[in-house]
Image (cartoon, rainbow, N blue to C red):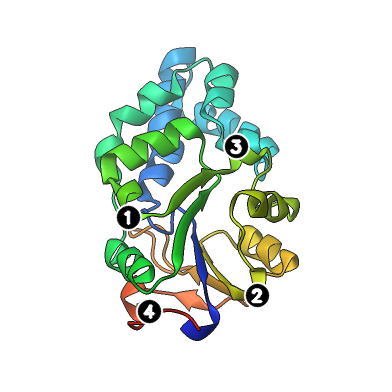
Amino acid sequence: MIDWEKIRTVLLDMDGTLLDLHYDNHFWQEHLPRRYAEKHGLGLDEARTRLHTRFEAAQGTLDWYCVDYWSRELDLDITRLKLETAHLIAVHPHVTDFIDAVRASGRRAVLVTNAHHKSLELKMRRTRLGAHLDAVISAHTLGLPKENPAFWRRLQRLEAFEPARTLLIDDNLSVLASARTHGIAHLLAVSAPDSRAGAKSTADFPALRSFRDILPPPGGPS
């Protein structure tokens, strides 16, 4: 699946890639609608309908991923609500083994996420994944979501990666398409970002089913 001899840098998404997307899906689809309904005196179905309309309008923008934006828009403390379900935050199987093997092989492992800093801090605190990575970068630092091809140019100002020698693993097909437009040559799509939802289509991107399947061999890149 991967020609490791051609790869020097590994860029890794967080939600749905390193972490089980069940936490986020449960929060946005179940927990938040209940709290929103309670706050605004609505039935649960009406709350879901109103939230769905707002979510659709923001999807693909930095606002969609911004804790502060949704706290203002919904008149709710999203950070506090996320803590109420934090016990669901979980790392996908074999993730730490994979990251450690990447770094042991002399390659760089960098987390690149659209997640807001407050969500990122919560998840890093709960999982301790930060200790395994060379760098952790939020799109909010760069001012563009990963879906925007210009994001990758900005990222190169922080991480001097060569697109032709870079592997990106992500569960978002729009992000993978954006990276491909920028010239990132090695792309993998996580086929089951939510462990409780089953596999999904990865379109024309190679599907990653387990990090155990792509462990790099010992020895560094050429």
Residues tagged 3 and 1 counted as in contact (Cβ below 8 A): no
What whole-number distance in Å separates the C-alpha atoms at marks 1 and 4? 16 Å
User: Who's the residue at 62% across and 64% down the image?
Assistant: 176
What whole-number distance in Å separates the C-alpha atoms at marks 2 and 1? 24 Å
Determine crowd level at label 3: few under 14, some 14-19, many 20+ residues with C-alpha closer than 10 A. Answer: some
Q: Which of marks 4 and 3 is in front?
A: 4
What whole-number distance in Å separates the C-alpha atoms at marks 3 and 1? 22 Å
**Residue bearing the label numbered 4:** 216
Determine crowd level at label 1: few under 14, some 14-19, many 20+ residues with C-alpha closer than 10 A. Answer: some
Q: Is mark 4 on a helix, strand or loop?
A: loop
User: Who's the residue at 49% across and 56% down the image?
Assistant: 13
Q: Which mark is residue 140?
A: 3
Q: Residue 33: x percent and y percent?
A: 45, 30
Residues tagged 2 and 1 counted as in contact (Cβ below 8 A): no
* Sequence order check, earlier mark of 2 and 1: 1
User: Who's the residue at 36% across and 22% down the image?
Assistant: 80
Q: Is mark 3 on a helix, strand or loop?
A: helix
Q: In the displayed structure, does residue 212 sit left or right of residue 58?
A: left
**Residue bearing the label numbered 2:** 164
Please say if 117 is above or below 171.
Answer: above
Please say if 209 is above or below 133.
Answer: below
**188, 151: nearer the viewer:** 151
* Sequence order check, earlier mark of 1 and 4: 1
Q: Which of marks 3 and 2 is in front?
A: 2
Q: Residue 40: x percent and y percent?
A: 49, 14
* Sequence order check, earlier mark of 3 and 1: 1
**Residue bearing the label numbered 1:** 132
User: Who's the residue at 29% across and 61% down the image?
Assistant: 96
Q: What element carries label 1?
A: helix
- Amino acid found under the numbered disc labelled 2: Ala
**54, 72: nearer the viewer:** 72
- Amino acid found under the numbered disc labelled 4: Pro
